Structure formats: structure tokens, C-alpha cells
Image (cartoon, helix red, strand yellow):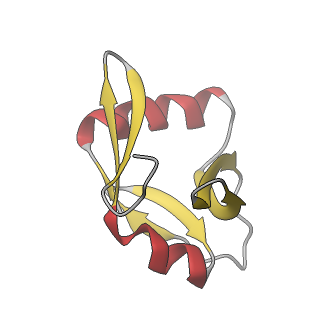
């Protein structure tokens, strides 16, 4: 997964506003197979996040493998998600 510098700015602002320090990603089933879900979280002492462009990101192994093609970007001050491997991109 990639987080662009433009997206990083928006994410950091959201983390500060919600008094969180990381993102948690997990997958659920959707019409196209899998769907990626995000939440702002406070990481636990025993959790070891992946650092992606300076953003702590927590995810299970299944989600980590699936997000290899995901790019979180920003357009007009809004986050965008691009997954070249998904039929729903």
C-alpha cells in the first residue's frame, strides 16, 4: 500500500482532530469480493503498526497481502482510494 504526501496531510489532520495515532485497516466481503475498511484508532502498547509514509497502519496478514496495489491519495482535499486489482476501482 502507498499513502501519498497529499493524503498523509489529510490523515494526520484527522488523527489529531480525533486524538488518534493510527489507522486500522480490515477487509470485509462486498459485491466485488473484498472491501477495504478504515478506522482511526489509538494503537495499543502491544500492537506493532506498519509505517506507511510516516502513518502507523494496523492490519492483519490477509489485509496486508491484499493491499499491495492500494494507493490512498487526495483530490480536492478529499481522500481517494485506487486499487488497480479491484473490479470496483
For this orientation, the residue located farthest to the left is 5
Q: Quadrant of residue 14?
A: top right
Depth check: give the residue in front, 53 or 86.
86
| Count of numbered circles in the view | 0
Q: Quadrant of residue 6?
A: top left
Depth check: give the residue in front, 45 or 87.
87
Depth check: give the residue in front, 85 or 77.
85
Q: Quadrant of residue 79?
A: top left
Q: Is residue 87 left or right of residue 46?
A: left
- Residue 28 is situated, as x and y percent measured from the top left of the image, at 71, 62
Q: Residue placed at 36% from the left, 18% from the top?
A: 77
For this orientation, the residue located farthest to the bottom is 61
Q: Residue placed at 71% from the left, 53% from the top?
A: 42
Q: In which quadrant will I find the N terminus?
A: bottom left
Q: Is residue 27 above or below residue 60?
A: above
Q: Residue placed at 30% from the left, 57% from the top?
A: 84
Q: Residue placed at 65% from the left, 53% from the top?
A: 31
Amino acid at each position: 500500500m502507498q499513502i501519498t504526501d497529499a493524503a498523509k496531510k489529510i490523515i494526520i489532520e484527522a488523527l489529531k482532530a480525533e486524538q488518534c495515532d493510527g489507522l486500522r485497516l480490515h477487509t470485509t466481503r462486498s459485491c466485488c469480493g473484498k472491501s477495504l475498511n478504515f478506522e482511526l484508532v489509538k494503537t495499543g502498547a502491544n500492537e506493532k503498526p506498519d509505517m506507511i509514509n510516516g502513518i502507523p497502519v494496523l492490519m492483519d496478514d490477509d489485509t496486508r497481502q491484499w493491499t499491495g496495489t492500494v494507493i490512498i491519495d487526495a483530490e480536492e482535499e478529499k481522500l481517494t482510494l485506487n486499487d488497480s486489482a479491484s473490479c470496483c476501482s
